[in-house]
Amino acid sequence: MRYVTESELRDEYAACPFETYRLAPDTRLTPGARQFLVDFRITFDAGAAAKPVAAHGASAPVDQRLCDSFLDDVRVLGAKLCLFSQRSQGICRALARVCGAAGAAWQRGEAGVVADADGEAPGELPVPAPELHPIYFEAALIDAELVRTAHFWTSAAADMAEEPRARVEAWGCEAQRIRSQIAHAIALAQEEVDHG
């Protein structure tokens, strides 16, 4: 499976602007690429590579194709969260535990494994100080990806039917909880450095 990135789309668009975009088989869009197409109001078929067929041979409803596309995003983010969990194991156990649980569930396409975090996720994550362990910089990158992806999910889910929308909203809520845990971990680490 190949993922089309935002920079590839920008290069293509700069060379020759287009109004529609069709994915080749075994190809998916990254969240940034999908957002680029949405921002430029370019119509695209996000489910072209693996489009389910309804009972009468017609294409699956748009809601199902969108939800399948979101599932691809969730699985990619799940893999990143699992990898991050392994890397952060000896540095911040609480963050590793939350990311590991969510990552494993997201890879299976599930949500709801992250317990409610204290307070809301930050609007803007505190920038890790240079003296912090590099894992916190990786956490900040994951946070930025969660923000961008959840923003897309929220805007696209508004037009979905109730069942797929509920599923997408569950992933969005869980992303907010993970972001809250990331912000908390960075703040604690910064306090330890400041009062070290």
Image: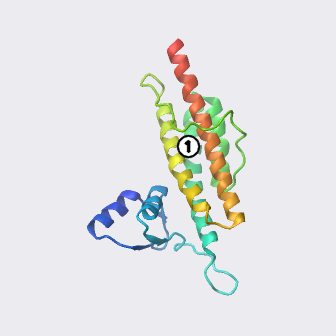
Mark 1 closeness class: few <14, some 14–19, many ≥20 residues within 10 Å: some
Of residues 62 and 71, which is closer to you in this image?
Answer: 62
Q: Determine the residue positioned at 55% across, 71% down.
A: 47
Taking the image as drawn, is residue 10 in sight?
Answer: yes
Which quarter of the figure has residue 3? bottom left
Q: Secondary structure at mark 1?
A: helix
Of residues 186 and 78, which is closer to you in this image?
Answer: 186
Coloring scheme used: rainbow
Taking the image as drawn, is residue 196 in sight?
Answer: no
Across and down, in percent, residue 70 comes to 58, 60
Looking at the image, which residue sits at the far top?
196
Q: Determine the residue positioned at 61% across, 46% down.
A: 175
Q: Which residue type carries mark 1?
A: Leu
Q: Determine the residue positioned at 72% across, 45% down.
A: 113
Across and down, in percent, residue 36 comes to 42, 60
Which quarter of the figure has residue 42? bottom left
Q: Determine the residue positioned at 69% across, 54% down.
A: 110
- Horizontal arrangement in the rendering, residue 105 relative to residue 22 (left or right): right
Across and down, in percent, residue 176 comes to 62, 43
Instruction: Identify whether 90 is placed above or below 153.
Output: above
Instruction: Identify whether 26 is placed above or below 114.
Output: below
Residue tagged by mark 1?
A: 83
Q: How many marks?
A: 1
Across and down, in percent, residue 151 comes to 54, 52
Looking at the image, which residue sits at the far bottom?
56
Of residues 27 and 69, which is closer to you in this image?
Answer: 69
